[in-house]
Image (spheres, rainbow, N blue to C red):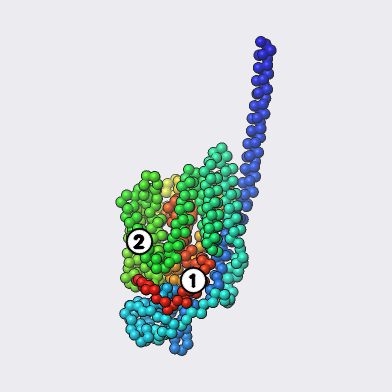
Amino acid sequence: MENAIESVKQLIGELGLWLDKLNGLISDSMALLEKTRAVYTLIIRWVFPLLACYIFVRCALPLLHEGKRSGAWGYLGLENGVKYPLMHWENSIGRGNLSDVRIDFPEISRSHAVLSYRRGGWRIFDLNSKGGIEVNGGKIDHSAKIKDGDTISLAGIALTKLPSDIDFSADPGKKTFLSKLAYLGRHISSGITLFLIILFQILGMLQLCFAMSADFNIAVPVSILSLLILECLYFILTRRRGGKYTELELFAFFLCGFSLFVVSSGAPNQLYKQLTAVVVGVTAFSVLKGLIGNLNRARKLKYVLAVCGLGLLAFNLLFGEYRFGAKNWISLGFMSFQPSEFVKVSFVLAGAASLDRLLTTKNLTKFILLSGACLCALILMRDLGTALIFFVTFLVIAFMRSGDIKTIAIISGGALLGAVAAIFIMPYIAARFEAWGHVWAYADTSGYQQTRTMIYAASGGLLGLGGGNGYLINIAAADTDLVFGVLCEEWGLLTAITVTLIIAFLALFTVLITAKCRSSFYAIIACGAATVFLFQTALNVLGSVDLLPLTGVTYPFVSNGGSSMISSWCLLAFIKSADERRRPDIEDIICEELDNLNYDPGEDWMM
């Protein structure tokens, strides 16, 4: 019996020694893991900004390449040999400075006519001009078809329609600074750029997994890896369909990766929702791009989208719920969304389709009424940030077609008076403006968010603390309204600036491509979308650091929010549609169109 007891004691002792060794091994493993995590974070903090900048450059340079098109779709020639090029499929003609074809004769009205090309030929429209229009000696009431060699008389000024001289292989001529930069990007492989983006997102995923340690959440690697699969599938399918230029989409996917990074840090339980929004956004981008590729179909969409947009805002006013002081959410039980995000898309397209061809008082009035209805609804919902975005977008779209500074100034003055009235009437808005410029005096009240954003963003320095290691994410709305601060704290100021430069570059790219858009419709929707991106980013970034009032708008593609993500992808489709390089067969299509100028399929020339 004593021997048995002794054996049990000995066994227990050996078991204890074994457990001590196991505990030591676990402790050593944890210590090694902690050291590995620290070393990885130290290295990756330097790698991230360099890799982000390199990805930015690789995506930006190919977008500066203007393509091979040289020449005009046609010309209008005076009797003395002077020729006016037709650079678009819709060309405004008049004495105004912003006319596509500026003919500076006193007899010609500021906005005299529009010369438009559709399948079936060219057609000229009279914009209620004082001097009228004649085609081959016959006065027209509203519009008439023309062909090469026809004589067009604008208030007695005779012009002849001359054929196109487009040469897709011609040398573009004098090299500008941008063209020299573009030359560097001609041979950059988008496949390698995609690989670098995937590498960046994998490294970020590992950083987040290290940072979580004991609180590991399987949703983080699953959602980020799913995004990588989506990126690869999109790239492969686009290439199989002949797509050559995917840098715009690569920019967007790069930003979507940061969105998942931010959500992983602050709201990992919403990762699958955000991933779903990316998938829906990419799908909406592809569908919308296809729909507006047909100009006539795109114009008809304006009625449907305008009605749907106003209906959403009306429904929001009646049944919406308040969040963070604004009544801009609709809850359906199983999901909630912000209608104003989708109304941005309909607003830009409806405005462009109303003003692209015939800039008449009637069309401008319709757009002003649509804009006024949207702005009034947003102000009643106390969503001042979105109202500002709509108003600035309205100004850009209206000025692009009218160039009437006096009218724009009067509208702006009226809007300013309305904004001042709203500030005094609505205490919530007044409180935001009261703290603007001196939030440190309200550090524990209305300036709480901005002061914490500046403190934590500064603590991140140039390189950041590492993904998942920040503290700002614990502040309310950090993953939406204060997302720039989160990027600064966790990923570093250099990376955050690079992310912001992407949005700024999208605006620059839009300006560069509008000069060669085949239709003013595409130029307007692209500029409208770019305005939304740029101004919304400015409000988000500058508002979070007290350079502008904090208005509670999201950062495109990056902030947590399904509605914002889907809306951003839809707006990107507008910029994509304005880029004539989007299809490799575009040259063949254009040549076919030009060969069929005398073909009349019974096209409905709808106003």
Whether the residues at callouts 1 and 2 have beta carbons within 8 Å, the answer is: no
At a point 47% along the width and 70% down the height, the residue shown is 517
**Disc ID at residue 81:** none
Q: Nearer the viewer, residue 450 or 169?
A: 169
Q: Dot 1 lies on which element?
A: helix
Q: Residues within 10 Å of mark 1 (few under 14, many from 20)?
A: few
At a point 45% along the width and 46% down the height, the residue shown is 476
| Residue 391 higher or lower than 116, as above or below | above
Q: Nearer the viewer, residue 107 or 546?
A: 107
Question: Which is nearer the N-term, disc 1 or disc 2?
Answer: 2
| Observer able to see residue 176 | yes
At a point 55% along the width and 57% down the height, the residue shown is 236
| Residue 582 higher or lower than 87, as above or below | above
Image quarter hosting the C terminus = bottom left
Q: CA distance from mark 1 to mark 2?
A: 28 Å
- Looking at the rendered structure, the kind of residue marked 1 is Ile
| Residue 279 higher or lower than 32, as above or below | below
Is 6 situated left or right of 551 in this image? right
Q: Residues within 10 Å of mark 2 (few under 14, many from 20)?
A: few
At a point 47% along the width and 81% down the height, the residue shown is 163
Percent position (x, y) of residue 108? 38, 82
**Disc ID at residue 589:** 1
Q: Nearer the viewer, residue 500 or 560?
A: 560
Percent position (x, y) of residue 235? 54, 57
Which residue is disc 2 drawn over? 304
- Looking at the rendered structure, the kind of residue marked 2 is Val
Image quarter hosting the N terminus = top right
